Image: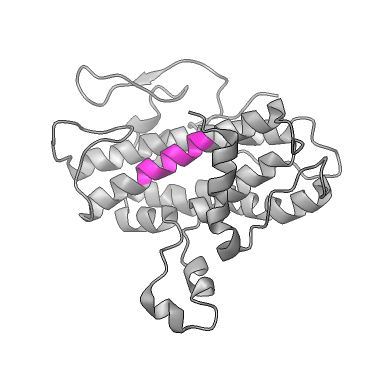
Amino acid sequence: MKVAYISAILVPLASGFVADTPGQKTRLTPLRDATREASVDTVNRKDFVNAAASSFVAIGLLGVGEPAFATGRATLDQTFERYAPRIRAGGEFYQGEFKQMVAKGDFRAIKEATEGVPPKRKEDLQKIDAGVAARARSAGQFSEDRVLTAADLFASAFSSQNSISPKTKKMKDSVEKVREAVKEMNLLAKQGTGEVSAGGGLFGFGGGKKPSEAELKQKIKQLYVVGGNAWNEYVLAANENLALQFDRFEFVK
């Protein structure tokens, strides 16, 4: 099976660079011309233990649940039932509504879609549930808290509590790539709305240069492709040798 890569068509693994700034080459994906079109279609690894610990941030808020290990206290059936719906919804949103947001260069919508659960506010303390439900609902449709935490925890299901399997490592490595792309898209979208100033990042402009709106939109399109290809790598790893009773995850296109 070959992993699907985002393009006008699905293409096999190949090399390609897109240079948007004179003299600068940015390693992206197999899509040499993907981000030169008007639409999106033509657009460290962390330590396992630390990543697992950080993933607990959203557990209480979104009801993601604790890590379930296939060889531990919970079965793969339970784990699949718990996390698969959230992962599927994330993929569908990414290739649907989110793609349109990126194509239009809608900075505010992109920011909201990738924004995590907001911090607790003083007024939340006056609510019966301390504002948990309201804050959970405000998490973006492709945010760390709503999608990527679930993807990470599902990956853990293919390892024992004492040993990390190659499958888990592949899946977690792919999630980390998606995570970095999402963080960058969120940052660039905030630059587009004027909430933060330019600088740094995976596609940073450097030198304190203020990017134009067109440049920001172009970089977000590049990141959309990076994130989509990493998501497809995750899907490929997840589907590999998955028991027949489980529905396969779909690639984003």
- Give the magenta part as a residue range: 176-185
Q: Position of residue 4 (x, y in %)?
A: 59, 30
Percent x, y of residue 52? 59, 43
240 horizontally vs 13: left or right: right
Q: Position of residue 106 (x, y in %)?
A: 32, 54
Residue 52 visible to the viewer: yes
Magenta-drawn stretch contains 226: no
User: Split into 4 quadrants, where in the image is the C terminus?
Assistant: top right
> What's the magenta bit mostly, secondary-structure-wise?
helix
Task: Check the image and tell me how it is coloured.
Answer: one colour
Which quarter of the image is occupied by the N terminus?
top right
Rendered image quadrant of residue 243: top right
Image-based side of 121 in relation to 5, left or right: left
Q: Position of residue 251 (x, y in %)?
A: 62, 38
Residue appearing at x 80%, y 42% in the figure: 70
Question: Horizontal placement of 38 versus 250: left or right?
Answer: left
Q: In the figure, 151 relative to 126: above or below?
A: above
Q: Residue visible at 30% across and 19% down?
A: 25
Compared to residue 223, the image places residue 194 above or below, namely below
Quarter of the image for residue 128 reads bottom right
